[in-house]
Every structure is written in C-alpha cells, then in structure tokens.
Image (cartoon, coloured by chain):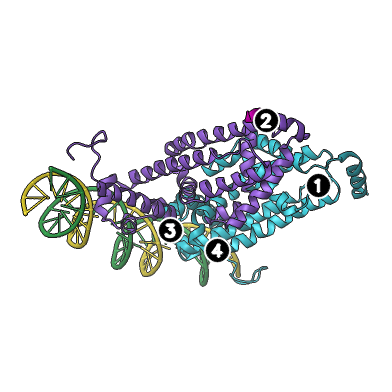
Chain colours: A purple, B cyan, C yellow, D green
Amino acid sequence: MKHDVSPDSIPPRGHEAKRASIMDAAGEVFCRESFAGANIDMIAAEAGVSRQTIYNHHGDKEKLFVAIVRDLTERCNAGIFATISTFPDQPKDLETDLIAFAVRMTRNCICNRDGKFLRKLIQTEGERYPELFAEWREQGPGRTWPAIAARFARLAHAGFLDIEDPDVAARQFLALANAELQTTFMLGGTPTDDEVLQSATHGVRTFLRAFARRQPAADAQKHSALAGA
Amino acid sequence: MKHDVSPDSIPPRGHEAKRASIMDAAGEVFCRESFAGANIDMIAAEAGVSRQTIYNHHGDKEKLFVAIVRDLTERCNAGIFATISTFPDQPKDLETDLIAFAVRMTRNCICNRDGKFLRKLIQTEGERYPELFAEWREQGPGRTWPAIAARFARLAHAGFLDIEDPDVAARQFLALANAELQTTFMLGGTPTDDEVLQSATHGVRTFLRAFARRQPAADAQKHSALAGA
DNA sequence: GACGAATTGGACAAGTCTGTCTAAATTTAT
DNA sequence: ATAAATTTAGACAGACTTGTCCAATTCGTC
C-alpha cells in the first residue's frame, strides 16, 4: 500500500477477490435465509473465508447487508440499462422485435442471479430498512421506468404505436410480458426459457392488440423512413 | 369437554378465542419479522397470551407457522371466490363494471390483511417449505385461476369480448389491473384507494382495447339479450 | 528473501431463543 | 359450589449467534 494508480487506500488484488467472494456468498445466504436467519459463519464458509475477514471488511452484519443491497441495486441497474439499450427503435417486425426485447428484459434483469436476489431482499426486508429501500426506489425504479417509457414514447412518435401515456404503457408492457410468471416468481423459482417465451409472446400480442396503430401501413412506413434517414 | 354438538375434542369457547388470537398475532409477527426473526415471546405478548399456551396449542414454532399458512390460504381463497362471484356476467357498462371488479379484486384479495400476509410469507419462506407451498399452489392459484378464467370465457361467449385463450386473458387482466402497484407491493406497502382505482382504470382500458369486440354493438346486443332471457 | 499487511482459526463473553417443567391462579361446565 | 381443564408466570437447560481478541500463518511486494 505505497503508491497506486487509483486514488488511495485500495488494497492488493487478493483483497478484492476476497471482498467479491464475500459479497457473492452473502447475497446468496441473505437471500436464502433472510437477514435474521442468515449467520456469519454460513457466509464465511460459503465464501471460503474466515469469519474474522468478514468483520474486517464490513464491520458488522447489518453493514454487510446494506452493502449487499447497494451492490445489487447498482449491478441490476447496469443490467437493465444495458438491456434497455437493445430496445427496438427501428423494428423490422414489431411483434417479433418486442417479444425478443421482453424476453431479454425478463431473462437478463428479472430471472438472473442479481435480479432474483435483489427482488427477494426487497420483499423480505423492505419494511425493516425504510431508508435503504427508499434509496433503492429512487436509484432503481425511479430511473429505469422513465428510461423504458422514453423508448416507448419514441416508438409511438415514430408511428409504430398509438400510445397516450408512455409511462403507463411501459408498465403495462412489462406486466403483460410477465403475466404468466407471477406464481413462479413468488415462490422464488426460475421459469424455463420456454415459459418466458410463452409469456412474452402472449403479453406482446395483447400489448399490440391494444396499442398497435389502427391504420398501420401508410403512416408507420412514412415515419420509420424519416427516422431511418 | 363431555358431549358437544361438534364431533369431539372441541374445547370450550375461551379456548377458541385464545387460538384465534394466537393465529392473528403469529401471522402479524411472522410476516413482519420472517420465520427466523420472529420469536415466540413476541407472538405471545402480541396475542395477550402466555408463551406456554402457544406451546399447548401448536406444539412448536414450525407447526405454528404451518398452521398460519394453511389458515391464511383458506381465508384468502374464501375471499377470492367471494369476489369472483361478483364478476359482471351481464355488464351494463363493460368498462365500468370491469374496473369495479378489478378494484374489488385488488382491495379485497391482495391489499387486505390476509392477502398481504400470505403473499409475504410465500415470498419469504416459500423456498424453505417446498411441500407446504406446493400445497398452497394447488389450493390457491390452482383453483382460483380457472375460476376467474371461466368467468372471462363466459363473457366472451356472451359476445362481450373477443378472447382466444381465457386462461391467458385472465392472467393478463389482473396483471394489467395491478401494473402500476408492483413497486408498492414489493416493499410491503398498501396503495391508496386512488392508486388502486388509477391502475385498475388504465389496466382495464388497455385490456378492452385488446379484447373488446371489434364490431361490438350489433353482436354483443344480440348475445347479451339472449343471455338475459 | 524479507518485510508489512491481511488472513486464519480458535477461544471467548454476552446475549438471545426454543422448548420443558413447575406450582399457583383462573376459567368453564356441571 | 365443586371438579376438571386451561392458563399463567417464572425458572431453567441447551443450543446458537454476534462481535471481539489474539497468536500463528500466509500472502503480496519490494
């Protein structure tokens, strides 16, 4: 710890590896056992680390828990924004492209490890840490929903959809895409690829029955040509 | 405990009162603290009962927990079926009646005490008691979804809706009705009446944009006239 | 190879919790 | 009013956790 490229106080490499391994294991265990049910020895064992190391890194159980939630929120946000960036702004086939997007959203942001863990921790401990989860609400949904809504607004503006309120439409889009997966999510399960595709397909079809341009061909072509230019 | 109208072994009245009071308190505490975080003294205090009485009634903490989940499942089912029975089979105004139904469903089955508690317990402890929650899945969603789907099927058959798959439509209906309440539910909160109405209104409008009869007037009138006869 | 920082394992006190046991008090039905 | 059943408060052992302390060891770097 003499001089380092980074600002200061960034300990050696192995240190970071331990830290990551602790975060991984702690997420897993907190999620599986809930905060009260988790114990530090379990986490230490699962991380392949001694109990003392956890205390060295994080101070106490509660601070560790808070660190996990912040970390998961950040990582999930990154995943969500990455997925949003694949939104079909200039769809070749609107239904196909929206289904594919819905599947990506579900698989990469909701079913994946981080998404599943964060969701569970929020549901389980949300009421016990109001400030922490208020922070999550701002950083997470508070930033991602507007981003998704903006994409739908653009798609509507480009003439592909007939939407009044993009915020409502965005929420309804994802609600529809996951409509058939609710029970599975509730129990902490992970739906199969097939179930995800099914739900997304049905959801997007209904979404388009509601919001596709009534007289699509002419107008949509014109607008999409303009957008492409 | 000599002879009683009921089969046998049904202890005195006060006994049942204690039992109910224990169930109430235990639901509250398990839900608030999670299984591991709850402790029997807390439940005893909240129930206004001595710790020993709880052990007399339920044997141990785990048996008590199982009893709570079974009880909540039953009560929720009752509420859901009661609400389903108010489904608008012969709607005067389809949109208005479906919105009112969606609001009833959300308020009486999802936001109420039992619904909130059961949902939280399933989310929190579902993975730890696979058999118990498999049972819930059969008794709960396994019976209520078909019942709701059947109502939509009738409504479609009567000419009010244009639905291919009533099961999918039923799930989408409720997903849409609650689309804007997801974040609140996640954090264990209870939405205001206004939020419920908003979400239901938007949801039902989208639902009807997707599934209302394209050429409504003529056919729907004919069918509804037949249904009314 | 030598130095300093980080990690380890194990012991430890203090606290909590479950589930049992008791004797006394209270309730309920006859 | 009396007898049986139930509830109560409190004490209790056994188990488990958290968070601290420390000496020995390992790791990463120069």
Say whether marks 3 and 2 touch (CB < 8 Å).
no
In which quadrant is the N terminus of chain B drawn? bottom right
Crowding around mark 1 (Cα neighbors within 10 Å: few <14, some 14 to 19, many 20+) is many
Residue A132, percent across and down? 42, 38
Mark pair 3, 1: CA separation: 57 Å
- Using the image, tell me which numbered label, if any, was put on residue B162: 1
- Using the image, tell me which numbered label, if any, was put on residue A225: 2
Crowding around mark 2 (Cα neighbors within 10 Å: few <14, some 14 to 19, many 20+) is few
Whether labels 1 and 4 share one chain: yes
Say whether marks 1 and 2 touch (CB < 8 Å).
no
- Using the image, tell me which numbered label, if any, was put on residue B146: none
Instruction: Work out which residue is located at the far front of the displayed protein and give it.
Output: A229
What range of the chain is rendered magenta? A224-229
Mark pair 2, 4: CA separation: 56 Å
Residue B39 colored magenta?
no
User: Pointer 3: what residue?
Assistant: B51
Chain of the residue under the numbered disc 3 shown in the image: B
Mark pair 4, 3: CA separation: 25 Å
Q: Nearer the viewer, mark 1 or mark 4?
A: 1
Q: Nearer the viewer, mark 2 or mark 4?
A: 2
Say whether marks 1 and 4 touch (CB < 8 Å).
no
